[in-house]
Image: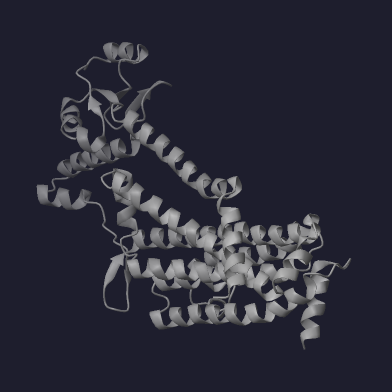
Amino acid sequence: MNNGLAIVIKQTYRTHFKSRGYWLLVLSPIIFAVVIGGIIFGITQMQGNTTPTVAVIGNPQVRKVFKADEKSLDIKVSKITDSKAANKALTATDIDGVLTIGADNATLTTQPKSNTINKEAIISVLGNLSRSQKASEYGLTTEQTQALIKPFNLKSVVQQTNSQSTDGDNSDMANYGIAVAIGIVTTMIVMWYASMIATEIANEKSSRIMETLLAATSASIQYFGKMIGIFALAVTHLIIYIIAGTIGYFFLQNNALLSGIKQTFSNVTIGFAIYAVLFILVAVALYLVLTAMIASLINDNAQVQQAVQPITILAMIGYMFSFVMTNMPNNIVIKVVSYVPFISQSMMPVRLVTKVETWPAAIVALLISLVSVIALAWFGKRIYAKNVLSYSDDKIMSQLIKNIKDRH
């Protein structure tokens, strides 16, 4: 590696790595996740001793059924069987509810401070008891009664090309979650680091340091050195998140909430996770190249937002397409866009994990983006070199279009 290039890479990386802003950027999501996780854990722990107590008044046989089903109903049946005593205990908040059983109906009385009672589960039990009673009156046998009250079981599965099936509900949740995660992660990282490289170039141009830098090194070295340095920061950022996620997993692996998440995303393999991370990194590199090209047209810091805005809009297009795709995966426009650089990183990983596309197609999309990075980098090198010492009053996009036309 050229010594000058290595120096620019190290300087760019170290300057930002040691900055307070970079660590605020990296640690803010982790701190937010820890705080939210702590709140959820605290609420879960507090809920451990809040099983509602319900007094069942009326039919003794119904009370026995509720007593036997306490665990599944998540309630505790009170010893109180008298209506007046039950209402008095409810007023004193000694119990959470009074379930009064009538001939053809029931009334559940609670008060504002009552713990939450699963009304749907109670309705289900009372409904089954009512149907059983009516079936007995109609002269049906026990087997016929059980067949009558048995709920209809609808199981949703997604058939895969390898003849395997997965749980449809879990698959839908996982696909939606992956679409959201990849879209958010890619968009946020692109916005953060695009703004970072744009600000760095703007600072150097506005302070006229760029002239001094180019006197010591070439424009190409500054161009590639800054991009590689910022890209290394993005890689470091992802590595920190992977390490933090791994540590969090080992600490919470027996947590009930985490177990549910693991079950939902059980079809996501390590191979896919590596593919998704690689695609995100390639996308970040692609956006950094584009940002460096546009940022070379900036005159001062006031134009940074103007330069970053089209980058942000382009990143958001892929993010929005990732949601549309989950509802119409076989649409021809969606298929084509899934291979388009700058957008494909938010779409092709989701199409792969949902089995809409195969691994060969996914690899092709990744390679297209990788080739686009290389081609755009070499194309942008000349635009950067031409404009990094130029100070024009024209709008940034007008300058970019003019430069592209001049190249032809």
- Residue 185 is at least partly visible in this image: yes
Residue at 26% in and 73% down: 164
Q: Is residue 384 above or below residue 124?
A: below
- Looking at the picture, how far across and down is residue 86, in whole percent? 28, 15
Q: In this view, does 372 lie above or below 171?
A: below
Question: Is residue 54 or residue 179 the one in the foreground?
Answer: 179
The quarter of the image holding the C terminus is bottom right
> Residue lying farthest bottom?
408
Q: In this view, does 38 lie above or below 25?
A: above
Residue 55 sits in which quadrant?
A: top left
Residue 76 sits in which quadrant?
A: top left
The colour scheme used to paint the residues is one colour
Classify residue 303 as left or right of residue 193: right
Q: So how many labels did they put on this image?
A: 0
The quarter of the image holding the N terminus is bottom right
Question: Is residue 139 or residue 323 the one in the foreground?
Answer: 323
> Residue lying farthest right?
393
Question: Is residue 164 or residue 306 the one in the foreground?
Answer: 306
- Looking at the picture, how far across and down is residue 93, in whole percent? 35, 15
- Residue 290 is at least partly visible in this image: no
- Looking at the picture, how far across and down is residue 140, in whole percent? 13, 48
Classify residue 244 as left or right of residue 182: left
- Looking at the picture, how far across and down is residue 49, in whole percent? 28, 26
Classify residue 326 as left or right of residue 196: left
Residue at 40% in and 36% down: 38
Question: Is residue 232 or residue 345 the one in the foreground?
Answer: 232
